[in-house]
Amino acid sequence: MLYSGPAFSVTALGDGIAELNFDLAGDSVNKLNQAALRDFDAATRAIANDASVKGVIVTSGKAVFIVGADVTEFGGMFAAGEEAIAKNVLEVNRMLSRFEDLPFPTVAAINGVCLGGGMELALACDYRVMSMAASVGFPEVKLGIFPGFGGTVRMPRLVGVDNAVEWIATGADKKPDAALKDGAVDAVVAPEQLRDAALALVRQAIAGRLDWKGRRAEKLAPIKLNQLEQMMAFSSSMAVVGAQAGPNYPAPMLALKNMQEAATKGRDEALQIEAKYFAKAAVTPQAAALVGLFLADQVVKKTAGSWGKKSAKEIKQAAVLGAGIMGGGIAYQSAVKGTPIIMKDIRSEALDLGMNEAGKLLSKQVEKGRIKPDAMSATLARIRPTLNYGDFKDVDIIIEAVVENPKVKKAVFAEVEGMIKEDTIIASNTSTISISYLADGLKRPQNFVGMHFFNPVHMMPLVEVIRGKQSSDEAVAATVKLASKMGKTPVVVNDCPGFFVNRVLFPYFAGFHMLLRDGADFQAVDKAMERFGWPMGPAYLMDVVGMDTAVHAADVMAEGFPDRMKPDWKNTTQVLVAAQRFGQKNGKGYYTYAPDKKGKPKKSPDPETYELIKGVVGARKEFAPEEIVARCMVPMVNEVARCLEEKIVASPYEADMSLIYGIGFPPFRGGACRYLDQMGVASFVALSDKYASLGKLYDAPKLLRDMAAANKKFFG
Ligand SMILES: NC(=O)c1ccc[n+]([C@@H]2O[C@H](COP(=O)([O-])OP(=O)(O)OC[C@H]3O[C@@H](n4cnc5c(N)ncnc54)[C@H](O)[C@@H]3O)[C@@H](O)[C@H]2O)c1
């Protein structure tokens, strides 16, 4: 062995070929943390110092090739400021260039996931062979940064500006065929042929049958386009990327500006430019928020994993009660992810509708080539529609998704409890009603939990698993395990009306209603909140949720939290519902809806809305966008803090992820707690106090006042 370190080893394979193998000790994946990078450099030097080496293949000892840089190191690194960040990445680049400059050919054998820094290491090789089972790409923009280990320098020189921009600005994972087509890899082979293919390639290069020197020279030179061509390529890319990313996500545009500035330069100068722009991206609040989000996601998944381990129960057969919007979606999702499910309703039309919806969703997957037609029929066969309880004795979990009415739900529970096994779990998909309250009267309340999916079920990643006062750990754990198996991110929360997500969403709606009461135009509110980063403003969101549903849920919340959620005035949504405007579902809400060319509902403003609400809104008044944002966000964020105080949600990580995955909180803000940290808790408390006259929703709770006084943050 020529070299052996904690991450890399070098072995002589004979005929002058050395294998540089990455197998990070003590970890299940290969990632380029600072220690691994230093080890890589030591291995490179060992190779350079061995006169017998004529060529190198780079391999991985794990199932992945390299997942990328170590994101847990980013926080500390990015906090050091632009200059230190640039210095740090330049140091890594010197290591990669030293490897690239080895006086013989190098080949990467990409066996599995190869992302970000991993792809950049592969680009420092002369050739790349990829297994059919692998995927490659640059996901950095999802973290608010862009490739900083030479990726923006080597990639356009290798695959052209247009391809490089597409790879880097979208952050998409690339399958082998796409990578080969774009020229990012040189060959794609079956997994078992990968090693031989890499060896064959390096042998050919050593024998001089491949012009590896010419290949390498292209990566070291300026981009091969004349000035006019470059201008054309970059200016058209900038227009597209700028429009796609929008003003809240600066990283893709910074990547592009960097590539343009570096286009006329050779490698080393170009790397200096990349380091400068990379540091600019790394210090943005968006990068801090998105990196935080990535880590929060890991914490949440780990927590779910440890919950899941607490249950030995295997859910082999599920059932859902109600084949409506939610029941149909739950049946589809369960079937797609392999758990057979009985779908029971009291109306056969509802069952037909539920099956049709599932069929439509599956057909779309077939059309997009994501699943094969036979997989579609197998999936549909996993949903068994029924009007009776015949087979319920073999069911391991029942997910209840009947109408949001406590009396109906309780009647259904009483009926079903007699038909099931002793340990069958009953999980309610209620969106607001307290789980402990619903459990009252059950024979086995320990088997009862909440399992709150979001609409549309197949799209929304979050499931709140609600632990009622009497729910057993076993029932919670088995439900968490099922939610994970269904491809969702479960978060365990304690019980209260609205649980976590709806409990904090309704104060936001209250802020919206108060603004309208005080004379704001709902379209101006939507615009300000969409600029802030929400996928849709509150009026539009009301329309999508269904305004009758929202009014009903608001009543439940009012009963639960009368001190702050029970206004003594009529709001615009109540007035519109009374006028039979229920939102998108009947084509009329705050806006009106008509199908566009693709059949999707397209919204338009409607003068009649203004007529209808004029009795409950004040004289029209202009509000500055910052004031609109503050009046909507302060009630939500204060309620998040109350939920943390009351331990409804266990940690700021889970709070933030629930908001991002459940209701589309702007990801670049990282969630409510991250938003508070970035604004400064003391500034937020001062902002709340400014609006104190609007009522208790604007009264910052003790947790925040204490944090402000102690100058504390939620994270780091
Ligand atoms: N729609 C949403 O956005 C959303 C989101 C999260 C949670 N939820 C909750 O999910 C539940 C269902 O909501 P939905 O929007 O799917 O309602 P829905 O009205 O679309 O569907 C309810 C279905 O339940 C059926 N049903 C009524 N009584 C039944 C019984 N005794 N046995 C079997 N089926 C019965 C009805 O026939 C209907 O098909 C509610 O508790 C709701 O609060 C809804």
Image: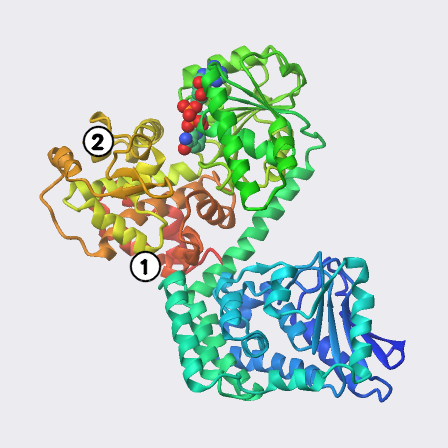
Residue 136 found in image quarter = bottom right
Crowding around mark 2 (Cα neighbors within 10 Å: few <14, some 14 to 19, many 20+) is many
Residue 243 at x, y percent in the picture: 36, 63
Q: Eyeballing the image, is 502 above or below 83? A: above
Q: Eyeballing the image, is 379 above or below 440? A: below
* Residue receiving disc 2: 576
Residue 318 found in image quarter = top right
Q: Give the residue type at disc 2.
A: Leu
- For residue 624, say whether it is visible: yes
Tell me the tag on residue 683: 1
Residue 316 found in image quarter = top right
Circle 1 sits in a helix, a strand or a loop, which is it? Answer: helix
Please identify the quadrant where the N terminus is shown: bottom right
Q: Eyeballing the image, is 180 above or below 126? A: above
Q: Give the residue type at disc 1.
A: Ser
Q: Nearer the viewer, residue 114 or 363?
A: 363
- For residue 696, say whether it is visible: no
